[in-house]
Amino acid sequence: MGAAEGVSTPRIAILTVTTNAAAHLPAYLDALERVTYPAWELWAVDNGSRDGSAAMVRERMPGARVLENGENLGFTGACNRALREILARPDIGYVLFLNDDTEVTPGFLEPLAALADARTLVAPKTYLAGQPGILDDAAGAFDWWRGTWRRRVLGRREGPADCYPHAIETANLSCLLVPAGAFREVGLLDDAFFVYYDDTDFCRRARAAGYRIFFEPRSVVYHRKGATLGGQASAFGCYYLARNRPYLIRKHRGLLPFAAFFAYYAATRAARMGLWLGQGRADLARATAAGMRDFVLGRMGPRR
């Protein structure tokens, strides 16, 4: 996978999680085959797919490390399984989280590796696939009072501030380059999340430990938002988002800030559920209510 390494070229493990991804995996793998960076390897963790996703990766990329789970361990469980093996490899300098519903550009890795160092994580510029110039909400700042992106960029056309490297507060794991040593110091992903908000949690922990996160717009990735899990418009997404958002705030904020957040959160979720019911989407309302209930009951990890 790639040409011979240069002496100063860090080796990068590209980590992806597949779950019944056969519909969009070909485009993902096609893009990886065009990557020009000379020192990378693919680690694919399959969460019990029944559509041949793991076999597709093996056939298309014989050099990939493919790990198969007999059940869906979630994004966190799948990533942590791979990370434990990756960290046993002293030759791997960085881990690149990369969603299987992304398509990378051939030269996307070089700018990320050039800006990264042992204390620096780097996120690319991510566009919504099929929408030239329209940004995904993959990097920026987080509002810890409301538990949402601050100045959310999803669906916004890029502007001057999106065209130069700069420090950011958080990034999602659709694509983020992380020095391997960060996992030894900060820890792995928090399995309580299963999926969603685990990236915000990890970035918060990394910054608290003294790591920096940078945005590098010379690296370009396209993201098919929601192609893997269905996103916020699915009952699956609504459940985990509703449950994990208060868990994230409680984990990182004091009692009084959390109490203020939860009052706001409960009111806005009630309004959202009423809106969904009016639109005939009782499934989304039920999933949101179940997520909030399970947070209160401490039922984290996979939905029971």
Image (spheres, rainbow, N blue to C red):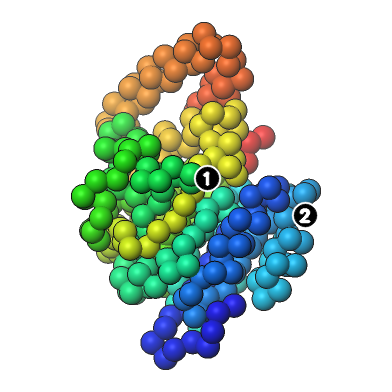
| Dot 2 amino acid type | Gly
User: Which residue is drawn at the image coordinates 39% and 73% (left, top)?
Assistant: 110
Q: Residue furthest top?
A: 278
Q: Choose between 178 and 131: the one closer to the eye.
A: 131
Mark 1 lies on residue: 224
Kindly tell me whether residue 303 is visible in this rendering: yes
Q: Residue furthest left?
A: 160
Q: Distance between the residues labelled 2 and 1?
A: 20 Å
Whether 174 is drawn above or below 30: the answer is above
Q: Mark 2 or mark 1: which comes first in sequence?
A: 2
Image coordinates of residue 215 in percent, x first then y, are: 30, 58
Rendered-image quadrant of the C terminus: top right
User: Which residue is drawn at the image coordinates 31% and 67% (left, top)?
Assistant: 120
Q: Choose between 159 and 72: the one closer to the eye.
A: 159
The numbered dot on residue 249 is none
Instruction: Please tell me whether mark 2 sits on a helix, a strand or a loop.
Output: loop
Quadrant in which residue 179 is drawn: bottom left
Quadrant in which residue 301 is drawn: top right
Kindly tell me whether residue 187 is visible in this rendering: no
Instruction: Please tell me whether mark 1 sits on a helix, a strand or a loop.
Output: loop
User: Which residue is drawn at the image coordinates 38% and 87% (left, top)?
Assistant: 8
Mark 2 lies on residue: 52
Whether 304 is drawn above or below 107: the answer is above
| Dot 1 amino acid type | Arg
Q: Choose between 193 and 57: the one closer to the eye.
A: 57
Image coordinates of residue 25 in percent, x first then y, are: 65, 54
Image coordinates of residue 225 in percent, x first then y, are: 50, 42
Q: Choose between 27 and 81: the one closer to the eye.
A: 27
